[in-house]
Amino acid sequence: MSSKISWIDNLRGIACLMVVMIHTTTWYVTNAQSISHVNWDIANILNSASRVSVPLFFMISGFLFFGERSAQPRHFIRIASCLLFYSAIALLYISLFTSINAGLSLKNLLQKPVFYHLWFFFAIIVIYLLSPLIQVKNVSGKMLLALMVVIGIVANPNTVSQKIDGFEWLPVNLYINGDTFYYVLYGLLGRAIGMMTTQKRGMNWLCAAAFMVGVFIISRGTLHELQWRGNFADTWYLYCGPMVFICAVALLTLVKNTLNNRPLPVLGFISRHSLGIYGFHALVIHALRTRGVELKSWPLLDIVWIFTATLAVSLLLSMLLQKIDTRRFVS
């Protein structure tokens, strides 16, 4: 179990950094008319490479809870505490520093998150709720690959429609609807791949190549959407889209195979504070962007600055919170 925990810690640290990168580059990818093509493309590639972060979090949860052990009452208490605590922090921030209607946000608390990034706490509850009913079996690599091809690509409703003379051959309609199906599927795959022997000849090169090709397709697909629509569209960015699906599976397998001995110091540290970083980072980025503490005249430098400042402030807040929250209910 110690080796498995090591790759999980490293993967969680990577996923946390990627989440911060997504929200750091969001302004640039959604405002292509305000920056040069080169700067937009760099931001697009960074964002494309980071789209796997959320699927990875679901896969980690699935690995932990879709096996012999399932979510216990303390886990539900913790996730509910996190949702309430970070919603309260967001409400306080909204009330004091923005013109957003805090009352309306509070009124709709159970229907939509107070601040956009808090949606994840709602979604992960589904994994916890289903965990007592699910125990993933050992499955062969060929069977798992076939499942991923069919559900992840061929029958994925997010696959871009493909037609020949009006005949639509992709995606095949298997009546798969809703993102939650794929969040649960990510959890199932996290457990299945986690139990599987993946140290095979050429596997790491194959996974690295699949990840890079997937990122390339996501970024080029997003560029194509921008060019023909005249505006940004997240068609290729979707967490449940086929290319993100492939990239998530590839990166999880690659990290499991290569970072399985011990938690790397930086990634292990980030992993231990991932909950606090996630809870605080969106508020920090919003504050930096809306208060003009940014360097938009130099986009690449600005990305480095916003990412670094957000990570540093979020880490500091997480460390302070852990000093108070000794039982780790929200940190």
Image (cartoon, grey):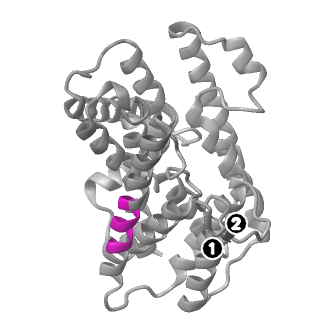
Q: In this picture, is 121 found above or below 7? A: above
Residue occupied by mark 2: 70
Q: In this picture, is 189 found above or below 49? A: below
Residue 270 image position (x, y, % from top left): 36, 48
Q: Quadrant of residue 126?
A: bottom right
Residue 70 image position (x, y, % from top left): 70, 66
Q: Along the line of sight, which residue is nearer the eye, 262 or 113?
A: 113
Numbered mark located on residue 154 in the image: 1
Tell me if residue 114 can be seen: yes
Numbered mark located on residue 146 in the image: none
Asked if residue 77 lies left or right of residue 270, the reply is right
Specify whether residue 140 is painted magenta.
no
Q: Along the line of sight, which residue is nearer the eye, 297 or 224?
A: 224
Q: Amino acid at mark 2?
A: Ser
Asked if residue 216 lies left or right of residue 157, the reply is left
Q: Main secondary structure of the magenta part?
A: helix
Tell me if residue 260 can be seen: no
Q: Along the line of sight, which residue is nearer the eye, 143 or 235?
A: 235
Q: In this picture, is 49 found above or below 169? A: above
Q: Which residue lies at the image location 65% right of the left edge and 36% below the top edge?
A: 83
Q: CA distance from mark 1 to mark 2?
A: 31 Å
Looking at the rendered structure, the secondary structure element under dot 2 is loop
Q: Count neighbours of disc 2 (C-alpha within 10 A) and say few if under 14, some if 14 to 19, many if 20 or more.
A: many
Residue 98 image position (x, y, % from top left): 53, 10
Residue 293 image position (x, y, % from top left): 30, 16
